[in-house]
Amino acid sequence: MSDPTSAPPDRLAWYQSMVRIRLFEEKVQELFMTGQIQGTTHLCQGQEAVSVGSIGAMRPGDVQTNTYRGHGEALALGMESETAFAELMGRSAGGSGGVGGSMHLIDFSKGNIGANAIIGAGLPIAVGAAVAFQMQKKPNVALSFFGDGATNIGTFHEALNMAAVWQAPVVFIIANNLYGEYSPLRTTTPMDDLARRADPFGMPGVIVDGQDIDTVYAAVSEAVERARGGGGPSLLEMKTYRYRGHSRSDPAKYRPDGELERWKARDPIELLGAKLVDEGVIGPNDATEIRTETQAAIDAAAERAATSPFPTLEETIPYVYAD
Amino acid sequence: MSTPTEAPERAATDAAAPTELTYRDAINAALHDALGGDESVLLMGEDVGADGGVFKTNVGLIEAFGPERVRTTPICENGFLNVAIGMSLVGMRPIVEIMFADFLPTAGDAIVNQLPKYRFMSGGQTAVPVTVRVICGGTGRFGTQHSATGESWFMHLPGLRIVTASSPGSAYSLLRAAVNDNNPTMFFEHKGLYGRKGPVTRGEIAPLGKAVVEREGSDVTIVATLLMVERALAAAESLAAEGISAEVIDLRWLRPLDLPTVRASVDKTRRLVVAEEQVHAAGWGATVVSELTIGGIDWASAPRRISLPDDIPMPYTPPLEDLVIPSAEGIAAAARASVRA
């Protein structure tokens, strides 16, 4: 999250953030193999620029909702790796005390007001926060992250309709990774460009290269500032790709040969890294060094997280009802 | 009805003195007082600001508080209930009106997966102070899809509170309690009761999770909610003429369920009848019977129930609607059978 006065953005920090997300997700897979993380998980390797670039456009007091594939947003918003690992391991030191798990990395103190495991539910929740900001006369904006599959559920259309009617300061961000769970987009959806779904609601619908973080940042900044200035909601479609299957149990055999490789050729981390080297922001060997350092930090965070105790049932009782 | 703009002032000047209001006006007064006392409170739902709302419970609110805080929504229950949740996460206290209880399943995800679980999934990081005002119940000839009470449909959800109002006084004080609570609360108001008159104490906030003994008796305990409370009271009156002393409990809260009050009553009467305007299976009546009998009983007779039929949806035609909804005579017959068993 940036400070309003801190332009231009710190692109080296973006790079580090994307590397952290990538290595975090790889570590999650490893911890699954050893049984330290159980149940299911939905990884976001390949989509890091969408999370980091979009969140780079947020200002203090802005909020966002994300999904079960939300590790990228949670980390980009500043959740510590240890806190996130502990949550995935079901430990007391997790962000939700271990009761939420992989699909619910939430941190209200950082503007992360929800990670939802129900497709489409985060959209109207973000609209509600945005309408509240309007009523409270706060200069804040709500973002909502979701996937291409969510554009087929009722809440997508209900949320865009309400946002448009009330001119709510909200930005809807589709991470269009081409697959709704196991199903290719065109088997469930009668169009390729989901940005067109903004048209019936009279709001801007913008197609964005989701692999290029500078493009993501520019598009989200424009939409966020438009919303903040009273210009109403926008729908942004990030063209992106997830390198892994839908969830832990999905080997993604439905993908045509060569598709993964084509997308990896435009890897968001590599793209920004090359630019930073070209511009002299980092040296040619710095990328490797950043990766090595980040890997060490990730490994250490996972180790520390594993030392946190499991919560007792008594510990979770205050999570049910507020005083 | 009191003129809306006067309502909050009158509440301030003589909060302690009960006034005679209809059930409808009691709800209107509670809404005026809740919105007037806290600017984070708002009312939202379909047509809530139009002409006092569909059931005229909202008269004067939009004039007093404006269209932002008395917010008419599109027709999309799941969408706007989730919007209310989003509002509650950043400091607002929305009251969401659901025009007919039968529309609640449309908002099933918001009610089942969001309202009760949101705080829990976050590890207690947030409260979710949303009140869902559900207009419910039969006797209005509204037909199969507009007549449910729906009061027990969401009892399986830890994290939720559920409360029902049977009289003007309790409608006021329970709605105020629902809005004051920091947890998601479903407040059920019965549209067949809107015209009933009774004493209302402005400013009164009912205690959480407390059932009320509406009439004391020694021979049989009748537990009821909503419209069934006045019918149970009428039944008790007719039973008294026969020499049977019935105790009537308005259960009020289904979550949390006030079992101690019911148990204390049955310890005395040793007979129990549950009177429900809903199918008995998997509802509060079945839960009360189960909880009170599960360890074995030494009552004077087995528990009885009177409820909607188990196997027929609500019919429109007036004679059949009247037949299937438990009457005072039906409740009296169940209690009489319990005593004479």
Image: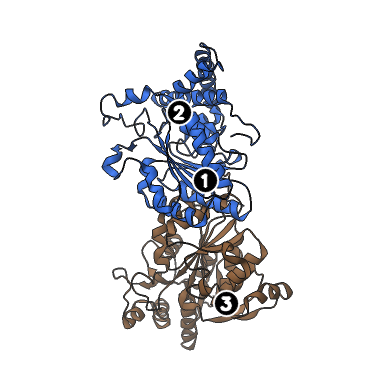
Count every numbered label the image shows and give the total: 3
**Chain ID for label 3?**
B
Q: Is residue B298 left or right of residue A83?
A: left
Contact check, label 2 and label 3, Cβ < 8 Å:
no
Tag on residue B120? 1
The vertical placement of B288 against A168, above or below, is below
Q: Earlier in the sequence, mark 1 or mark 3?
A: 3
Q: Amino acid at mark 2?
A: Asp
Residue B237 in view, yes or no: yes
Q: Which chain is blue?
A: A
**Chain ID for label 2?**
A
Picture residue at 41% right of the left edge, 48% below the top = A198
Q: Which residue is mark 3?
A: B25
Picture residue at 55% right of the left edge, 25% below the top = A11
User: Which image quarter is the C terminus of chain B in?
Assistant: bottom left
CA gap, disc 1 to disc 3?
Answer: 36 Å
Tag on residue A212? 2
Disc 2 packing (10 Å; few <14; some 14–19; many ≥20): many
Q: Which chain is brown?
A: B
